[in-house]
Image (tube, rainbow, N blue to C red):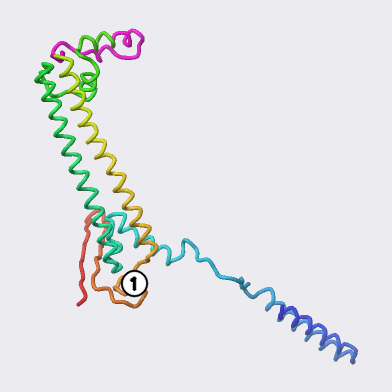
Amino acid sequence: MGRWVGLASVCVATAAGAGGPLSTRSQDRGALESAIRTEADQVWGAPRIRSGPQTPSAFDGQALARVKHGAYSLLLPGWSQWRSGHDRRALFFATAEVAVWGTWIFSELQANSREDNYIDFAQQFARVGSRDHADDYWRAMASFRDSDDFNADLRSEIRAGLQPDSALIPDDAAWRWQSERRFREFQRLRADALGAQDRADFVIVFALVNRVIAFIDAVRSGPPSSESGEFSTGETKPRSWTLDVRPNPTNPNARLAYRYRF
């Protein structure tokens, strides 16, 4: 607003002296045009200043640095927090990661052990000769008392074109449960094995969730101010990891360095 007032003042002041001699009026006209151009350049050529707080861009240098810093925790939860000196947060995410994968390993071992149990049970009480069968075979054993009933039920689907002839159980893979009780026990053993496998698969979801939460926490807390180890708060970083990858097609190499400041 002040620049508009200044421009108007120039015009008024020059117009006030326009009544003098001709030479003087020519000089005044030139001075007026020069003053107007100068003032106009200041009005329209100056950058506009927005009022109120400015929102930083999501793609500025600081935001990209935060995302890069948080990427360490996508690889290993707690790594970003450890790099920035947040040891308690790093310990929390690292402990959660160990618990997740410990649960996964336990569930996988349990699933494999229970699978061996129900296969041994089938060999003992259903006269199954081989262990090398697909999961469809064991699922059929948990649904039919013997292979003849399964084939009879399957032939109707084969006639309708829903199943191929190869889906029939051959004579060398036939089974027959000794009793209804053994048949029900096999169903229970197989259900326990499938439940353990489902738990192992579901644990992977927690591993992903732990990484996402660790990444968000690292982005919000922010990275060190520089790779030299100084924090934005002025605190000296006592340790750091440096990963240098050189994807040279003729001589690819990588270097992982650890530094501790005493």
From the viewer's perspective, is residue 14 above or below residue 139? Answer: below
Decide if residue 208 is on the left or right side of residue 39: left
Residue drawn at the location 20% of the way across and 72% of the way down: 260
Q: Nearer the viewer, residue 232 or 245?
A: 232
- Among the 4 quarters of the image, the one containing residue 186: top left
The residue most toward the front is: 181
Identify the image quadrant of the C terminus. bottom left
The quadrant the N terminus occupies is bottom right
Residue 133 vertical position relative to residue 50 in the rendered view, above or below: above
182 or 19, which is in the foreground? 182
Residue type, label 1: Ser
The residue to which callout 1 is attached is 226
The count of marks equals 1
Q: Which residues are magenta?
A: 155-178
As displayed, is residue 135 above or below residue 89?
A: above
The image shows residue 177 at horizontal and vertical percentages of 15, 15
The image position of residue 83, as x and y in percent, is 28, 66
Callout 1 crowding tier (Cα within 10 Å): few <14, some 14–19, many ≥20: few
